[in-house]
Image: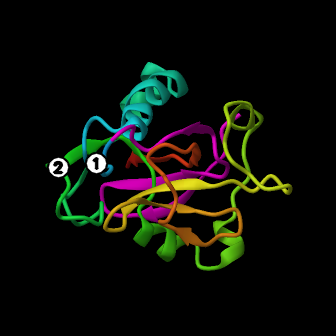
Amino acid sequence: NRSLFIIAENENYYTLISTKVIDSTCFAHGGTAGYTNAYTDIRLFTEGSFFNWAFTEDEKNLLTSVTFKNGVSSGSASESADLTNKVSIPSKAEVEQYFSTQNDKKKTTTDYAKLNGVQANEYGQAYWWTRSRSSSNPYRLTPGGSFDANATGYFSSAGILPQIFLAK
């Protein structure tokens, strides 16, 4: 059961985002790489195993690729080269733009995500990653809907709130 809603539209595609945190992964083991690094755990998940598992071949053909500019969408000019994705996670700026209240930023988990170790509070509201980072750590959202960049995020298991890019 997939629940997605449109958070943005431009002339070429719609950006849809999940209503729930769907899985758990660390951001990146053993390094300070940001999302635009092709080899972070979270990017390998969204563009790899999740993409291949969640979509049929016909659905994959409906998705379009979006390029994240180094230092623009990712939030840090010190990261790797631009990358193109059909599935991503939202940036800090997108979260601020499309989830205007603290309550909008609070996301619950799927049962699968709970079983896979997503950190959540007693109400089922989860920690979840953004693709942006501070000077040293990735930003994640807390169960209360606040940004946190003080976590040992490269090793902890916050959740993934995927966004996809649907061609018009």
Residue 64: x %, y % from top left = 32, 42
Residue 166 horizontal side relative to residue 145, left or right: left
Residue 88: x %, y % from top left = 41, 46
Residue density around tag 2, few if under 14, some if 14–19, many if 20 or more, within 10 Å: some
Residue 148 magenta: no
On residue 33, which mark appears? Answer: 1
Of residues 89 and 66, the one drawn nearer to the viewer in this rendering: 89
User: Which range of residues does the magenta coloring cover?
Assistant: 1-30
* Residue drawn at x 55%, y 45% as measured from the top left: 156
Label 1 is placed on what type of residue? Ala
* Residue drawn at x 68%, y 36% as measured from the top left: 117
The residue where tag 2 is placed is: 80
State the residue lying farthest toward the bottom: 101
Of residues 8 and 80, the one drawn nearer to the viewer in this rendering: 80
Relative to residue 135, is residue 126 depicted above or below? above
* Residue drawn at x 61%, y 72% as measured from the top left: 146
Name the secondary structure under disc 2: loop
Task: State the image quarter where residue 111 is shown.
Answer: top right
